[in-house]
Structure formats: structure tokens, C-alpha cells
Image: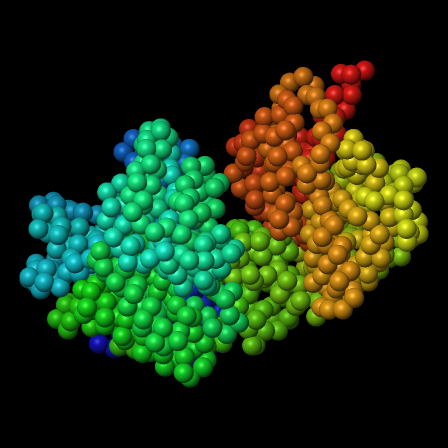
Amino acid sequence: MATSSPLIQPTKSRAVGNDLRALLGSGKVKDDGPTLTAYAVDASIYRIPPQAVVLVESEDDIAATIGYARSRGIPLTPRAAGTNLTGSAIGSGIILDVSHLNRILEVNQEKKWVRVQPGIVLAELNKQLSSQGLMFGPDPSSGDMCKLGGMVANNSSGPHTLRYGSVKDNVQSLRLCLTSSSWIEARAYPLTDPTLERLLTMVPALRDVLVLTQAHADLIAAKRPTVSKNSCGYNLFGVADGLAQGVFDLPKLFVGSEGTLGIMSEATLRLVNRPTSTLTALLHFKNLEEVGHAVPQILTLQPSALEVMDANTLNLIGRATHGIPTDAAATLLLELDAASVEIDLQEQADALRTICRPYKLASEPTVAFDAERREQLWKARKALYPTLYRFDPKKKPINFVDDVVVPAEHISELIRYLEDFFGGQHVPVAIFGHIGNGNAHIVPLLDVNDRGDFEKMVQAYQDVHSTVLNRFGGSICGEHGDGRVRAEFVQRMFGDELYGLFVQVKKSFDPGNILNPGIKLSDASFTDHIDYTRLSKSCATCAKCNSVCPVYDVFQSEDMSARGWFEIVTANDYSYLNSKRVVEACLNCKSCRTICPAGVDVSDLILQKRAEHPNRLAGLIFRQQAKGINFDAFLHVLASTQRMWDRPFVRKLLERITGPIMKALAPTARLPHDLVLPKLARRHLRERYAHVATREIEESPTRTVAYFHGCAANYFDDGVGDAVIEVLKKHGVEPALPPQRCSGTPIQTYGHVDLVRDGARFNLRSFAPYETIVTGCASCTLMLKDYPTLFPEGEERQKAESLAKKVVHISEFVARSSEHPPMANTGGTTKRVTYHSSCHLRAAGVTKEPRQVLSSLPGVNFVEMQDADRCAGGAGTYVVKDYDTSKKIFDRKARAINQSGANVVATSCPACMIQLKNGLDNAVEVKHVAQLLQEAYRAAEGEKS
Ligand SMILES: Cc1cc2nc3c(=O)[nH]c(=O)nc-3n(C[C@H](O)[C@H](O)[C@H](O)COP(=O)(O)OP(=O)(O)OC[C@H]3O[C@@H](n4cnc5c(N)ncnc54)[C@H](O)[C@@H]3O)c2cc1C
Ligand code: SF4
Ligand code: SF4
């Protein structure tokens, strides 16, 4: 059956989009070039540009889109986060993105179930359930970004499947729209249930499946995979099991059907209790065969997860980086949960050590109980696949034999076979996965643009899959789905007869082959639609960056996301004019760069594109600022008149008057009348500290520590600069304030790279003689540390590298200081303080120190807030560039601050303070870490006197 045949194609390129806009409203339909580019990929090796994208907002939208696709014979592909590794969320027709349907509809704590929409991210769901001590058990490593719709459609699972099963074991019911546009509730119906009969009459396809499964029960039983996990083909095995027990178990049919039978709008999921305590352990084995012997013994401890990484994988991710001994032949990562207290786990840890004693381990078992350390142990494993992208500029990890399952006791034998096979091909390969389930992820590194490597890929596809079936009696797919990549092999896995039943099932539900054609059942080669261009690029399209991108958080649309932007700005047909809308939407928060396991900096790529079209107005302003005197004088005038012009009615007028000028910054830019502007300083910081603020660059200054105050602390009356200086003094240091120019961050965001370099050269000269450069601003900290990137080579590069090493944020300075000035509680009462972790400081690697400082303050009850690491949406001037989006980004931060119950929110950045003060409206006090320190030192002084 040629299930991948293209259907009737529209004649006009935008006809589909226009029809859909007329049907659904223009806001929900996109078909511009950048959008189609962004939606042409998922996390697989394929690329297929669609004709239009629909961001559905209701069940009516789903039904209407299906109806339209059916009537026109246009392929329709449902999509959630697009993290599948098989090409199942891309298609040539309409992409139906369910990301806007992302609510939790109902939770039943007592009966432990939750009803959700398909667009909710797994991590988000579990975060919200955590307060009730519950979670959804299946945990793909992509849990920070993947969404429930995709998880259900793929029957996903993860390391903890050993304890909690796959998605199919945890679904109670689904609400689905079929190609007829009718809705069904897919639950387990007793065969005697009268509603079932009505349903079968209403939906003949369901009766077809019932009859077909009953009639072929023997064939289905004979072909049932004998391994612990299988996501290959349609799950008629589960349906047959149900029928044997007198129920028609519909979730078994639809879970894992990869959007080929119906589109889900709701899922009711079974929940489990969160473990009260957990132990994570790392075991480095010197001998692979011994792993095979140890695993059955370790399984007697009933671990909730048991993962393996082979020697090649350890080499590829870098043993030194992850502290893995050089002689480790394989590493096991395991987790043990306790329902009660930690002492049980101590006993378990002892039992584990006893089990390991007879084996040759390359080092003592590493055992961790606290969340942070455990997370650290998991980090490399969870980001393994994209991390492999760092290995070689040409050879990339290619997912085409990535998900085989064999009986767990044969996994060492499988690994040995794979190492020999790929060794024979001279192909580096990473082998890792869920050893407890016998599920191995095999990721060879290949340059598919090289003919030789391409042929090796095709050979490996056939050999590995055949060996898994014939020698090991396994399955070609445990959890990732068949998609495009395995569809070709499904018939080989199950034989013609059972495959014929699968085809009948598909035809019954989708006679026009509208829903996700080419997925699961296809005679097309797995090499069709490979994205050769992308596979020579640096991005793994894993979407991890989307999970932290504040713009994606608000828009939930791939064209407004870090991953999408990578695709857009690196596309061969990229043009600034066509892509301006998206290229100018990035906040330059750097969250994507901080998190990307492949080492990609999307924000930098975007800045490079902006640099090709620098903003004129911004250039004019920054040039004036660099000149100094006039700019400072202008700010003095503004400061002395602020009382007059910062009144509500004048601000309204100002918003109007400045409107046309602001438009020169961006079409969305304005000076919102309700934006709480920072108070401008009547005397700038440099004037207030004139005795240490030198006018000329000093070649041999007497002081060794310099304070890079940046623009905000100089021009605003926010108390930050004074606090930093006072704190330094308490630590026995009177800093110099050498002449300085803007560090460059805001200038860079408007595309003026030359101006940034000029400023950097000035700052390099001015700060070169100092041993330590203290900052109080997150963005300045990062920019100064990033100066080497502005100078590709030579003396300037060396100077920049030398300066970068000397930069410390004030919280780092205090945390590392040997001085411990006395501190006391301010005001006598205990303050509940939480911390907003500024994006640029995180990107600069400073995360622990501000928290350490805050926790050490007397009278401070430090509480970690959820989403502390998420952007607050200020991003320098972004707040005026796109105020509405900025506010939407802040909503999430405001919720987190409120939930924390804090009366003070501390941060490390004057720019974030503006956004926090504006958004929180005095409800919670906003302080810089240095200000809280200053208060504690002053309070101790006060007590003394
Ligand atoms: C780094 C990385 C690690 C991964 N680790 C794991 C792992 O440990 N375990 C694992 O199982 N997978 C893993 N995956 C694969 C992938 O993340 C999972 O399959 C995930 O559940 C897909 O979810 P998604 O939201 O991205 O779905 P998408 O990729 O958007 O879609 C997946 C499928 O679901 C269909 N679909 C989406 N929404 C609907 C709907 N509403 N109705 C009907 N069909 C729908 C799509 O058409 C498609 O067929 C990993 C991927 C990456 C990149
Ligand atoms: S930029 Fe990095 S995090 Fe984002 S999709 Fe690419 S590899 Fe993944
Ligand atoms: S810098 Fe921030 S806004 Fe821009 S792409 Fe990265 S995460 Fe998104």
C-alpha cells in the first residue's frame, strides 16, 4: 500500500492558507516563508516544508481543519513540540499545532488522575502536580520540552518506564476527532456496555477494528513481540488483550498511533505518587560482559531506572568533562526510590555496593541523595543526543536505528555486536539507553553528505534491524515511534499478514489517507526527505532551547522560537526583509545559549543578522552616548524635570508625541505611559564618587580593584552603584571608577557591532591595569566576559581574554571574599526573600553565589521560586521595543514570585530591577543583592554604635 502518496495539491501557493484563514480567522493561520521554514523540521533527520500552519485554539478549530483537509485531500499533520526523532510531526500539507491547547482541565488527587490538553509540556504538568505530591510516570529525556499530545501519540517512555511503564500503561481515556470530524471518547468499554454498541454504530471504523482483532486473534498472538517494550505498528496486541478480558480498550489502539488515526484534544492520565526520597548512583564498569551479569542482580533491588552508556558514548561526550574514568567500558546510571525515609535508601546503597563488589569497577560507585547532585548525574544522560553534535563539524549523530529493544539479558551481547558492526564500518557510534528494559538507543556519527557514509547508513539500517529481529527476537522500536524512519521496516517486523491488518485499520479510520500520510505505514525509503543541508549544520533541532525561550513561551509557535530562528536565519533563502518580524523578536536573553547541549548560540546568529541592518535611530543615540558630555547633560535635564514629565497625563502625551520616533526603533516600539520608569539621578554615580572616578585612562593606577558600573547604575537613582561601592568598602576595598563606555549589550541588540567594538577597545584600555573588575550588572558581566568574541585574533583578542578572566560580579566577589564583615538583621523581622536569576548572569555562569549570599543574610528566609531561571522580559530596552510581549513574558515571573510568598525579590541586575518594579507594582519589594548586603552591614554598624 502506497500510503505516502501525495494527494491533491492546491494550484496556488497560498490558497490553502487563505482558505484556512477564511475558515478559522487570520490569527490562527500562518503561511509566510519564515513560518514554513521553521515548521519544516522536527528533531528527526528529515525536512518537509508545509503549505500552512494552523495554531488551533479549540475543538471546533480541530474539527474544521480536519473537515477542510478531507474535502481538499490535503495531508494534515498534528504537531505538539516537534521533538520526535522520526519525522512524524512534519508534512507537506497542513501542520495542526496543538501548542495553544495547553491547560490542565481537572485533577483528581484522591483517585490520582489528571485531564489535560495535548499542548501542555510534561515538565510543566509535573511542576503543577508536585504541590499535590503527584506526577505522570513516563519520563522521556525530552520531558522539559515535549508535550502530552506527542507523548501519547508516540507512546513515549523514558528511564523510569522500568517502574511506571510507557504512556500506554498510564492513559485512562482520550478525546479524539476522527477524519469524519466526529468526536469520540476513547476509553476501555466493557463489551456488554450499551454505549459501546452505539459508538460502534456511529463509528464503523471502530467496529472494523473490533471484528478484525477478534477474527485474527491467533495471528496477532503469534506475532506479538516478546520484549518488554514495543511501539512498532498499531497496538492490536493491546486491543486483543482487552478483548480477551471482555473490554474494548480504545486507548491501546490510539496511544502510539502517531497522529495517523485521529487528533487528540484531551487525555485523562493516571498519576503516581512522587517518591519521597531518591537515590541516584553511577557505576563505571571496566568490563562490558560484567555489566550483563550485574544487571539481573541490580534489578532485584527494584530500581525505578537503570540506564547504560557504552564506552564509545563515554568517549564521545568527553570522559574528562564528566569525570568518567578512562578505563570504564560502560557506565550504569540507576535510581532507587523510597516511599518513606532516607534510611531505607542507605540500606539500598549498601546492598548495591555489595552487588558490585565482585565486579571490576573503574572507580567507587558514586551515590547521590540530594536533588542538585542527582540532577548533575542525570545531566549528561538527558542531553546525550544533542551533546554528540559537538563531536565533529561534519559527522553528526544520525537517528535511523535509534530505538531497538532486545530481551534485557541480551543487552551486553547486543552492545558487543553493535560495537563490532560499527567498528567494522569505522563509524563512531554512541550506544545508550534503558538497559533494564533492553531498549538501546544507537546513534552512529556520519556525514550523510559523503557518499561512503551514506552507504554505510543504508547498510547499517538493514543489518542492525534484521539482526535485532532475527538473532535477538527483538523489536525495531521501543518508544520513539515508527514515523518516516522505521515505516519502511514495519512490514518486515510483523510480516505481510499482520501488516495487512494494520493497513486495514488505517483505511477504516482514514480512507482518504489525510492524517499524517507516510508515517508508520509506508513503502517509501527511509532516506526520502533527509535534510542533507541541515545535517551539515550545528543544531540538533532538539528544541531544548524552545523550553527556555521566553518568546516561545508566549507565542507557542515554532516561528517565534529559538529553534525556529536557527532554521530561519541559516536557511539558504534567508532574507532580512522577509524575516524581520522574527529576527527582531528575540530578546537576546541568551537562555538558549546557556542551555544548548550542542553549543549553538542562536542569539548570536540573530545578532549577526541584525548587524547587517543596524538600526539608525539607536545608532544615533549610542553615538551621542559614547561622546559623553552632551548626552550626560541631556540626562541631567531629564532628571531635574522628571517630576514634571513623569506624571500620568504628561506621560500619556509623551507616548503620543514620541510614537513616530519610537517606530524608528521597531514597529511595536512605544514609550508606554504606564511603564514605571526608573528615577533618573540628578547627580550621576561618577559625579557622586568623583574622588575615585577618574576622567582620563590611567596607565598605572594606585588601586587594584575597579568597578565597572555600566550605564544603569550611573544614570539611575536606583541605589545599586552606591551599594556595590559600600559593600566593597566593607570588604576592605575602595574601588576605582575608571573611565568607561557602555559595555555594549544594548548597542549590539540594535546591530551596531562597530560601535560595540569601539566601546570595547576603550574599556579594554581603561581596565587593563586593574587586577579585579567588579560588576553589579548581569549584562555588563556577560558582555565583558564575552569581549574575546568581538576580536577574532591578535593582540586585541589576548587583551580581551585577559580582561574577561578578571571580571567578577559583586555576588561572586562577596562569596569568595576572605573578609566576613559583621552583618545584622535589618528591621528586626524575618524577611522572606526570593531570587530572580538574571539571564545574562546565568549565561556568565554565576548562579550559586547570589543565592549563597542571600542565604547568609541574618533575618532572611531565602526561598527558591519556581521559574527563577526564566527571563523576566525586560531585556534592556526590549520593554519599550515590544511592551506587550514583555508584559506577557513577565506574567509567568509574577506568578512565580507570588507563589513563593516572598516579600522581597532580589536580583543581580539593575535592568531586571526595572522590569520587576514595573510588573510587581510595589506589591513586593525589589532589591539588588548588593543592596541587601549593604543593609545587613549597616544594621551591624547600627547595633555597634
Ligand atoms: C533530546 C531528545 C531526547 C528524547 N528522549 C526520549 C525518551 O527518553 N523517550 C522517548 O520516548 N522519546 C524521546 N524523545 C523523542 C520525543 O521527545 C518524544 O517522542 C516526545 O514524546 C514527542 O513529543 P512532542 O510533543 O515533541 O511531539 P511531536 O514531535 O510534535 O509529535 C509526535 C507525534 O505525535 C503526533 N501528535 C502530536 N500531537 C497530537 C495530537 N494532539 N493528536 C494526535 N497526534 C498528535 C504527531 O503527529 C507525531 O506523530 C527524545 C527526543 C529528543 C530530541
Ligand atoms: S540550538 Fe541547541 S538547544 Fe536549540 S534546537 Fe539546536 S541543538 Fe537543540
Ligand atoms: S536569546 Fe532568548 S529570546 Fe532570543 S532566541 Fe535565545 S532564548 Fe529566545
Q: Quadrant of the C terminus?
A: top right
Please indicate whether residue 349 sits to the left or right of residue 677 in the image: left
Residue at the (70%, 70%) spot, across then down: 612
Please indicate whether residue 195 sits to the left or right of residue 840 in the image: left
Q: Quadrant of the N terminus?
A: bottom left
Residue 149 is at least partly visible in this image:
no
Q: Which percent across, then down, holds residue 726? A: 80, 33
Looking at this view, is 111 or 839 the one in front? Answer: 839
Please indicate whether residue 221 sits to the left or right of residue 490 in the image: left
Looking at this view, is 221 or 428 the one in front? Answer: 428
The number of numbered badges drawn on the structure is 0
Residue at the (69%, 46%) spot, across then down: 778
User: Toward which corner of the image does residue 906 lie, by quadrant?
Assistant: top right
Vertical side of 243 occupied by 791: above or below: below
Q: Which percent across, then down, holds residue 358? A: 29, 47
Residue at the (40%, 64%) spot, across then down: 312
Q: Which percent across, then down, holds residue 213? A: 11, 60
Vertical side of 779 occupied by 749: above or below: below
Looking at this view, is 409 or 189 the one in front? Answer: 409
Q: Which percent across, then down, holds residue 548? A: 53, 51
Please say which color scheme the image uses: rainbow
Residue at the (17%, 50%) spot, across then down: 249
Residue 378 is at least partly visible in this image:
yes
